[in-house]
Image: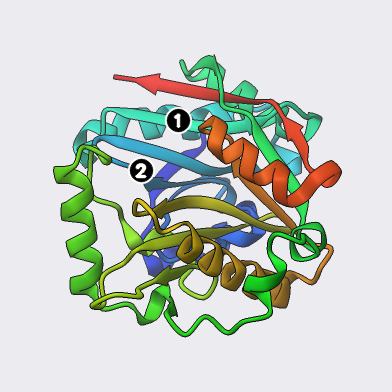
Amino acid sequence: MPEYYLLDQEHKKPFLPYLNAEDREDPSLEVLGAAADGAAAGALAFVPAGEGDIEIRSLAVAENRRKQGLGSGLAKELARIMPELGFRRAYATVVECVDHLPAMEALLDAGFRLKEGMPVAECPLSALLASPVMKPFLEKEGKDVAPLGDVPEGTLRKLNRELLDGGYLRAPLDWSRFSPALSFCGMPKGGEIAGCVCLHTWEGGVYVDWAYARPKASRTLMAVLAAALKAAAGRYGPDGLCSAVLASDAGASLMEKLGGDAVKRTNTLRCVLEL
């Protein structure tokens, strides 16, 4: 019979090959491991994503252990321990493609329900970097732009408080979930954050995890975006991909304005479990 464990750092290593490549070096992820016959056989990785929520980032089992219920067993074990960890809802966003079907089937078998997700836009970094709109910002070194890793914690906490008080957030942002080397903040006045673009690594590129700009700070946002795109291209090359969830018409318009015909839209689905 398979056994399931919530792993500490010391015991994660044998299970890391079952995570998405970009998740294997992310210390913020919690990992559930599945063991069979005394050996690692699969894993599910998740991260807190707001008040009471969990986002599932990876779910896979060994090829020779598929069709044996390990994937759904991992999802059921997550559901069992969620109340102990203080969570009420878990979700995973999946693209409608063959590669994601096994994970989606495992989640549905464990009681998750399928809902329509928000569309995602995907574009090569080369198209964004060649955009005439981006050109003036890419040619300048943004003197008021700083990598997320260099922004003082007190400044990040202050922005969280402002966004919570203004009703823009339901729960404080966990800044540690963003890639510090690929995320940037613009602070042109008094050290306060006027805009930021926070990226996370994904298969073959990056996705925009969160973006924000104060009113009348559109130029700051563009300077921050330019810094983020240059950093992403430095890691993945111009053929790397940049993805963004189209949560608003403004976001869709900006992505298509910058990327033009190179932007492709993909429908996503969301597997959700609510306790």
Q: Looking at the image, is 49 positioned above or below residue 184?
A: above
Which residue position is annotated with label 1?
Answer: 91
- Tell me whether circle 1 and circle 2 mark residues in contact (CB < 8 Å): yes
Q: Amino acid at mark 2?
A: Ala
Query: What amino acid is labelled 1 in the image?
Result: Tyr
How many numbered marks have been drawn onto this rendered protein structure? 2
Looking at the image, which residue sits at the far front? 216
Q: Is residue 188 visible?
A: yes
- The answer to which of 61 and 227 lies nearer the viewer is 227
Image x and y of residue 175, in percent: 34, 61
Side (left or right) of 169 relative to 105: left
Give percent across and percent down for residue 267.
69, 26
Q: Which residue is mark 2?
A: 49
Front position in the image: 223 or 206: 223
Residue 8: % across, % down: 35, 62
The residue depicted at 29 percent of the width and 19 percent of the height is 275
Name the N-terminal-most of marks 1 and 2. Answer: 2
Query: How far apart in space, not on screen, are marks 1 and 2 (Cα)?
Result: 9 Å
Residue positioned 23% across, 48% down in the render: 163
Q: How would you rate the neighbour count of disc 1 (Cα within 10 Å): few for under 14, some for 14-19, many for 20 or more?
A: many
Taking 127 as reference, is 16 left or right?
left
For image coordinates 66% across by 48% down, the residue present is 243
As helix, strand or loop, the secondary structure at mark 2 comes to loop
- 33 is higher (above) or lower (below) than 108: below
Task: Classify residue 79 as left or right of residue 241.
Answer: left
| Residue 93 coordinates in the image, percent (x, y) | 56, 33
Mark 2 Cα shell of 10 Å, populated few (<14), some (14-19), many (≥20): some
- Where residue 134 sits, quadrant-wise, is bottom right
Label 1: state its secondary structure: strand
Return the residue nearer the eye: 14 or 192. 192
Tell me which colouring the rendered structure shows: rainbow
